[in-house]
Protein backbone atom coordinates (compact mmCIF):
# COMPACT_ATOMS: atom_id res chain seq x y z
CA UNK A 1 0.00 0.00 0.00
CA UNK A 2 2.85 2.38 0.87
CA UNK A 3 4.44 1.74 -2.55
CA UNK A 4 1.11 2.46 -4.28
CA UNK A 5 0.74 5.74 -2.44
CA UNK A 6 4.29 6.80 -3.27
CA UNK A 7 3.92 5.98 -6.97
CA UNK A 8 0.56 7.71 -7.11
CA UNK A 9 1.92 10.85 -5.50
CA UNK A 10 5.04 10.88 -7.65
CA UNK A 11 2.68 11.58 -10.51
CA UNK A 12 2.14 15.01 -9.02
CA UNK A 13 5.83 15.75 -9.51
CA UNK A 14 6.58 14.03 -12.80
CA UNK A 15 3.61 14.74 -15.07
CA UNK A 16 4.49 17.52 -17.50
CA UNK A 17 1.91 20.29 -17.88
CA UNK A 18 0.11 20.63 -21.19
CA UNK A 19 0.01 24.42 -21.36
CA UNK A 20 3.60 25.48 -22.05
CA UNK A 21 3.43 28.92 -23.74
CA UNK A 22 -0.01 28.45 -25.27
CA UNK A 23 -3.07 30.51 -24.45
CA UNK A 24 -5.00 28.38 -21.98
CA UNK A 25 -8.67 27.51 -21.97
CA UNK A 26 -10.36 29.46 -19.15
CA UNK A 27 -11.23 26.55 -16.83
CA UNK A 28 -11.37 26.45 -13.04
CA UNK A 29 -8.39 24.08 -12.98
CA UNK A 30 -6.28 26.38 -15.14
CA UNK A 31 -7.19 29.41 -13.04
CA UNK A 32 -6.27 27.48 -9.89
CA UNK A 33 -2.83 26.81 -11.35
CA UNK A 34 -2.48 30.45 -12.39
CA UNK A 35 -3.24 31.65 -8.86
CA UNK A 36 -0.43 29.44 -7.63
CA UNK A 37 1.95 30.74 -10.28
CA UNK A 38 1.33 34.33 -9.20
CA UNK A 39 1.41 33.42 -5.50
CA UNK A 40 -2.15 34.69 -5.10
CA UNK A 41 -2.80 31.58 -3.00
CA UNK A 42 -0.72 30.71 0.05
CA UNK A 43 0.17 27.07 -0.56
CA UNK A 44 1.17 26.70 3.10
CA UNK A 45 -2.48 27.28 4.04
CA UNK A 46 -4.00 23.81 4.46
CA UNK A 47 -7.59 24.92 3.81
CA UNK A 48 -6.72 26.57 0.50
CA UNK A 49 -4.42 23.74 -0.54
CA UNK A 50 -7.16 21.17 0.13
CA UNK A 51 -9.57 23.08 -2.12
CA UNK A 52 -6.83 23.35 -4.74
CA UNK A 53 -6.47 19.55 -4.60
CA UNK A 54 -10.23 19.13 -5.10
CA UNK A 55 -9.98 21.18 -8.29
CA UNK A 56 -6.76 19.88 -9.79
CA UNK A 57 -6.44 16.31 -8.45
CA UNK A 58 -9.88 15.06 -7.43
CA UNK A 59 -8.83 11.40 -7.73
CA UNK A 60 -5.96 11.94 -5.30
CA UNK A 61 -8.27 13.88 -2.98
CA UNK A 62 -10.86 11.10 -3.14
CA UNK A 63 -8.31 8.38 -2.37
CA UNK A 64 -6.43 9.97 0.51
CA UNK A 65 -8.34 12.88 2.09
CA UNK A 66 -10.13 10.75 4.70
CA UNK A 67 -6.84 9.48 6.16
CA UNK A 68 -5.12 12.22 8.18
CA UNK A 69 -1.62 10.75 7.89
CA UNK A 70 -1.80 9.95 4.19
CA UNK A 71 -3.31 13.34 3.46
CA UNK A 72 -0.49 15.06 5.30
CA UNK A 73 1.89 13.27 2.94
CA UNK A 74 -0.19 14.34 -0.05
CA UNK A 75 -0.01 17.97 1.03
CA UNK A 76 3.77 17.74 1.24
CA UNK A 77 3.98 16.22 -2.25
CA UNK A 78 1.60 18.84 -3.65
CA UNK A 79 3.67 21.70 -2.24
CA UNK A 80 6.81 20.20 -3.77
CA UNK A 81 4.98 19.79 -7.08
CA UNK A 82 3.82 23.42 -7.08
CA UNK A 83 7.34 24.65 -6.35
CA UNK A 84 8.73 22.59 -9.21
CA UNK A 85 6.09 23.37 -11.83
CA UNK A 86 4.62 26.79 -10.99
CA UNK A 87 6.67 28.53 -13.70
CA UNK A 88 4.95 26.33 -16.28
CA UNK A 89 1.42 27.03 -15.05
CA UNK A 90 -0.76 29.14 -17.40
CA UNK A 91 -0.23 32.88 -17.57
CA UNK A 92 -2.06 33.40 -20.87
CA UNK A 93 -5.78 33.02 -21.60
CA UNK A 94 -8.25 33.45 -24.40
CA UNK A 95 -11.88 34.52 -24.28
CA UNK A 96 -14.31 33.55 -27.03
CA UNK A 97 -17.52 35.19 -28.19
CA UNK A 98 -19.82 35.40 -31.19
CA UNK A 99 -20.49 38.60 -33.12
CA UNK A 100 -22.87 39.45 -35.93
CA UNK A 101 -21.89 41.42 -39.00
CA UNK A 102 -24.15 44.23 -40.14
CA UNK A 103 -24.41 45.17 -43.81
CA UNK A 104 -21.23 46.13 -45.64
CA UNK A 105 -20.55 49.88 -45.71
CA UNK A 106 -19.35 50.66 -49.23
CA UNK A 107 -18.38 54.19 -48.29
CA UNK A 108 -16.03 53.30 -45.41
CA UNK A 109 -15.11 49.87 -46.84
CA UNK A 110 -16.04 48.35 -43.49
CA UNK A 111 -18.14 45.54 -42.02
CA UNK A 112 -19.68 46.95 -38.86
CA UNK A 113 -21.16 44.81 -36.10
CA UNK A 114 -24.81 44.85 -35.13
CA UNK A 115 -25.56 47.12 -32.16
CA UNK A 116 -26.13 44.25 -29.73
CA UNK A 117 -22.79 42.57 -30.54
CA UNK A 118 -20.54 45.60 -31.05
CA UNK A 119 -17.18 45.67 -29.29
CA UNK A 120 -17.45 48.94 -27.35
CA UNK A 121 -15.29 49.78 -24.33
CA UNK A 122 -14.63 46.15 -23.44
CA UNK A 123 -12.12 45.62 -20.62
CA UNK A 124 -13.56 42.83 -18.43
CA UNK A 125 -14.07 39.14 -19.19
CA UNK A 126 -16.03 37.10 -16.63
CA UNK A 127 -15.93 33.36 -15.94
CA UNK A 128 -18.21 31.65 -13.44
CA UNK A 129 -17.56 28.10 -12.24
CA UNK A 130 -20.07 28.10 -9.38
CA UNK A 131 -21.59 24.65 -8.95
CA UNK A 132 -25.23 25.44 -9.69
CA UNK A 133 -26.37 21.81 -9.77
CA UNK A 134 -25.95 21.36 -6.03
CA UNK A 135 -23.92 18.22 -6.67
CA UNK A 136 -20.65 17.81 -4.74
CA UNK A 137 -17.59 18.88 -6.68
CA UNK A 138 -15.30 16.13 -5.37
CA UNK A 139 -15.61 13.31 -2.82
CA UNK A 140 -18.94 14.55 -1.51
CA UNK A 141 -17.69 18.09 -0.88
CA UNK A 142 -17.83 21.48 -2.56
CA UNK A 143 -15.25 24.25 -2.47
CA UNK A 144 -15.26 26.15 0.82
CA UNK A 145 -12.40 28.63 0.53
CA UNK A 146 -11.14 28.72 -3.06
CA UNK A 147 -12.68 31.27 -5.48
CA UNK A 148 -14.97 29.79 -8.12
CA UNK A 149 -15.62 32.90 -10.22
CA UNK A 150 -13.06 35.09 -11.98
CA UNK A 151 -12.79 38.22 -14.04
CA UNK A 152 -9.86 39.09 -16.27
CA UNK A 153 -9.42 42.86 -16.47
CA UNK A 154 -7.26 44.45 -19.16
CA UNK A 155 -5.75 47.92 -18.81
CA UNK A 156 -7.43 50.11 -21.43
CA UNK A 157 -10.92 49.33 -22.73
CA UNK A 158 -10.95 48.19 -26.34
CA UNK A 159 -13.37 49.37 -29.00
CA UNK A 160 -13.48 47.84 -32.47
CA UNK A 161 -16.07 49.52 -34.65
CA UNK A 162 -15.89 47.04 -37.47
CA UNK A 163 -13.70 45.03 -39.78
CA UNK A 164 -12.04 46.79 -42.73
CA UNK A 165 -12.51 44.86 -45.98
CA UNK A 166 -12.01 45.75 -49.62
CA UNK A 167 -15.11 45.22 -51.72
CA UNK A 168 -13.55 42.15 -53.30
CA UNK A 169 -12.69 40.57 -49.94
CA UNK A 170 -16.08 41.53 -48.49
CA UNK A 171 -17.79 39.79 -51.40
CA UNK A 172 -15.67 36.66 -50.88
CA UNK A 173 -16.53 36.61 -47.15
CA UNK A 174 -20.26 36.96 -47.81
CA UNK A 175 -20.07 34.17 -50.36
CA UNK A 176 -18.30 31.95 -47.82
CA UNK A 177 -20.92 32.68 -45.14
CA UNK A 178 -23.72 31.92 -47.60
CA UNK A 179 -22.13 28.63 -48.65
CA UNK A 180 -21.73 27.75 -44.97
CA UNK A 181 -25.46 28.39 -44.44
CA UNK A 182 -24.50 31.15 -42.02
CA UNK A 183 -27.47 33.33 -42.91
CA UNK A 184 -27.17 35.51 -39.81
CA UNK A 185 -23.54 36.45 -40.58
CA UNK A 186 -22.20 35.16 -37.29
CA UNK A 187 -18.44 35.44 -36.89
CA UNK A 188 -16.28 34.30 -34.03
CA UNK A 189 -13.84 36.33 -31.97
CA UNK A 190 -11.05 35.40 -29.60
CA UNK A 191 -9.37 37.83 -27.20
CA UNK A 192 -5.81 36.78 -26.31
CA UNK A 193 -4.48 38.03 -22.96
CA UNK A 194 -1.39 37.68 -20.77
CA UNK A 195 -1.78 37.85 -16.99
CA UNK A 196 0.54 40.36 -15.28
CA UNK A 197 -0.76 40.62 -11.70
CA UNK A 198 -3.14 38.99 -9.23
CA UNK A 199 -3.66 40.46 -5.77
CA UNK A 200 -3.35 37.59 -3.24
CA UNK A 201 -6.27 36.25 -1.22
CA UNK A 202 -6.34 37.35 2.42
CA UNK A 203 -8.03 35.74 5.40
CA UNK A 204 -10.95 37.77 6.75
CA UNK A 205 -12.84 37.34 10.03
CA UNK A 206 -16.63 37.44 9.73
CA UNK A 207 -18.99 38.74 12.43
CA UNK A 208 -20.19 35.19 12.98
CA UNK A 209 -16.67 34.24 14.02
CA UNK A 210 -16.04 32.16 10.91
CA UNK A 211 -13.37 32.93 8.36
CA UNK A 212 -13.33 33.46 4.61
CA UNK A 213 -10.69 34.34 2.07
CA UNK A 214 -11.12 37.48 0.03
CA UNK A 215 -9.16 39.56 -2.41
CA UNK A 216 -8.73 43.14 -1.08
CA UNK A 217 -10.91 45.62 -2.92
CA UNK A 218 -12.96 42.95 -4.70
CA UNK A 219 -16.47 41.92 -3.69
CA UNK A 220 -17.74 38.37 -3.92
CA UNK A 221 -20.02 39.30 -6.81
CA UNK A 222 -17.07 40.44 -8.92
CA UNK A 223 -15.08 37.27 -8.40
CA UNK A 224 -11.32 36.90 -8.27
CA UNK A 225 -9.78 39.81 -10.16
CA UNK A 226 -7.00 38.87 -12.58
CA UNK A 227 -5.14 41.78 -14.19
CA UNK A 228 -3.90 41.19 -17.71
CA UNK A 229 -2.56 42.73 -20.91
CA UNK A 230 -4.51 42.39 -24.14
CA UNK A 231 -2.19 40.87 -26.77
CA UNK A 232 -4.51 40.65 -29.75
CA UNK A 233 -8.07 40.12 -30.92
CA UNK A 234 -8.68 37.72 -33.80
CA UNK A 235 -11.83 37.26 -35.83
CA UNK A 236 -12.78 34.03 -37.60
CA UNK A 237 -15.41 33.08 -40.15
CA UNK A 238 -16.00 29.58 -38.79
CA UNK A 239 -16.83 28.15 -35.32
CA UNK A 240 -13.69 25.98 -35.41
CA UNK A 241 -11.74 29.24 -35.63
CA UNK A 242 -9.58 27.98 -38.47
CA UNK A 243 -10.44 30.70 -41.04
CA UNK A 244 -8.90 33.92 -39.77
CA UNK A 245 -10.41 37.01 -41.42
CA UNK A 246 -9.01 39.86 -39.34
CA UNK A 247 -6.51 40.44 -36.55
CA UNK A 248 -6.35 43.45 -34.23
CA UNK A 249 -3.41 44.44 -32.04
CA UNK A 250 -3.73 47.21 -29.44
Image (cartoon, rainbow, N blue to C red):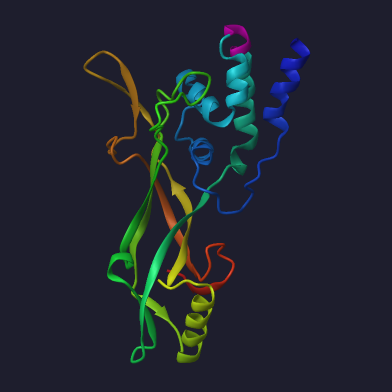
**x, y percent for residue 14:** 73, 32
Image: 167 above or below 137: below
Q: Quadrant of residue 223?
A: top left
Quadrant into which the N terminus falls: top right
Q: Quadrant of residue 220?
A: top left
Main secondary-structure element of the magenta-colored stretch = helix
Q: Which of the two residues, 216 or 246, is positioned nearer the viewer here?
A: 246
**x, y percent for residue 235:** 48, 69
Give the residue at the far left of this rendering.
Answer: 207
Whether residue 237 is visible, yes or no, is yes
Span colored in magenta: 67-72
Image: 28 above or below 190: above
Give the residue at the far right of this rendering.
Answer: 3
**x, y percent for residue 217:** 27, 38
Quadrant into which the C terminus falls: bottom left
Image: 166 above or below 57: below
In magenta stretch: residue 214:
no
Amino acid sequence: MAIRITLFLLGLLLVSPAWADDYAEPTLENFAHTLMRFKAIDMMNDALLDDYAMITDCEIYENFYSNDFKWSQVRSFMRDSIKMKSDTFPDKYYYEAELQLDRYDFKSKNFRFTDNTAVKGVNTFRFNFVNRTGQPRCYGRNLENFPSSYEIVIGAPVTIGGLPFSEEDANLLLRYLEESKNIYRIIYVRFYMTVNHIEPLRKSELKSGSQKYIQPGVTGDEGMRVEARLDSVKFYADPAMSKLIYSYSP
